[in-house]
Amino acid sequence: MKTALTRRELLNRCGMGMGALALPGLVTGSPAQAAGAAGPLSPRAPHFAPKAKRIIHLFMNGGPSHVDTFDPKPALTRYAGQLLPGGNLTTERPTGAAFPSPFKFSRYGHSGIEVSDLFPHTGECIDDIAVIRSMQADIPNHEPSFLLMNCGEARLPRPSMGSWLTYGLGTENQNLPGFIAMCPRGKPTQGEQNWQSAFLPGVLQGTYIDTQFTEVTRLIEHIRSARTSPERQLHMLQELRLLNEAHRSACGDDPQLDARIQSFELAYRMQAEATDAFDVSREPDHIQAMYGPGIQARQILMARRLLERGVRFVQVWHDAGQPWDNHGNILDHRPLARQCDQAIGALLKDLKQRGMLDDTLVIWGGEFGRTPTVELTSGLEAGGGRDHNHYGFSMWLAGGGIKGGQVYGATDEFGFRAEENPVHVHDLHATILHLMGFDHERLTYRYAGRDFRLTDVHGRVVKELLA
């Protein structure tokens, strides 16, 4: 007579949600912790003393225009309506005449750095910001550029930056993921690939949060079990642990099994912590007013609350798809900036007044920039938008060991190509890892007979950005 269930039979009969699969992680610790071993999320020291301990990456997906935000180009006004010297500029689509920015630039702070009127609240914090005006990517297409910016590789499956950092550092709060990706109204272009763990342990993949919702049960799928009481969960999971240990004894280590167990346990532990972390209504009224209304403000405030609770890397996407991809009308940048500028300025000020900005790195930017010339929408007809431009664009960094109040690098006089001190995405990644305490050439993972790293075989630390 059959006296024991297989693992698959037990799971099928239990009918539990993901969050119900790991009560022992809350009550008695995970299997790895119970065995005295360090799990993949356990805190670890970097190679050397870090300047930053945590990161918020504000990802303006779609490609914000640098010549309309942080890289003013008066020469475009002089050449307005004319072809630039050298003829038409082409990246992905044909473009026409010089297209001056419709937005006004003003100087901010003691540094006097120019910022457009799209970002006045961010401009107020410019003395804490280092603007890189000479960024470069490889291709003027969204999909490969998303993956290059997030994973260091445009084509092949590679771990994301957040996964690499969680691999290297672990997380300070075992009840929350080390890496969270927040994007309202669905997932961005390339979906989970943007926060994938690839060949790293699966538990290091970013946890996706749909921030259009406010209820924790909708923010995080399967965070609650509707079928099983905590007492019943504990009994079933004790049995499941015995089966898992028997499986390991018979078959040896199985990375996929380990990743699944760790993810289940983490998901359950989140039930106690997530409700508090994602509930911005618990913030004082003056803090909520400082960040402002709307989804973007709420998710940026959530990001600060998550960092306070030990999450290592929070990526904040502006929205699903490519909202900043304004081919037809660059004036669409204005409502997009209004959705996030107040909250970005509030974040920098809030981190500073809490004493967190010194060891929190804030990153702002998209996957590439846009052309200084008008896009030709059909034949020779000119629209009011700009095409993709990977040859030169702007990003900025603040806090976490960054020397603020400076501009690094420059594009040519029209803003088409990085001309002075170019910074490739690989260089940006090397610099970020350095600020987090890592030599980017030594943070590696052996897979398929090769030692892989975020920067592949490239990258240099841009020391001029460091405080």
Image: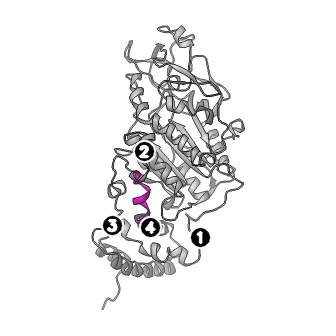
**SS assignment at label 2:** helix
Whichever of callouts 4 and 3 sits on the residue coming sooner in the sequence is: 3
In the current view of this chain or complex, which residue is farthest to the bottom? 1
- What's under tag 3, amino acid-wise? Gly
Q: For the residues carrying marks 1 and 2, which lies nearer the camera in this image?
A: 2
| Mark 1 and mark 2: Cα distance apart in space | 38 Å
Q: Determine which residue is flagged by label 1.
A: 38
**Left or right for 120, reference 355:** left
Residue under label 4, please give it.
269
* Span highlighted in magenta in the image: 272-280
Residue appearing at x 51%, y 37% in the figure: 345
What is the CA distance from the residue labelled 2 to the residue labelled 4? 27 Å
Which amino acid type is shown beneath numbered disc 1? Ala
* Percent coordinates x, y for residue 124 in the rendering: 55, 31
Q: Which residue is mark 3?
A: 17
Q: Is residue 147 magenta?
A: no
Mark 2 or mark 3: whose residue is earlier in sequence: 3
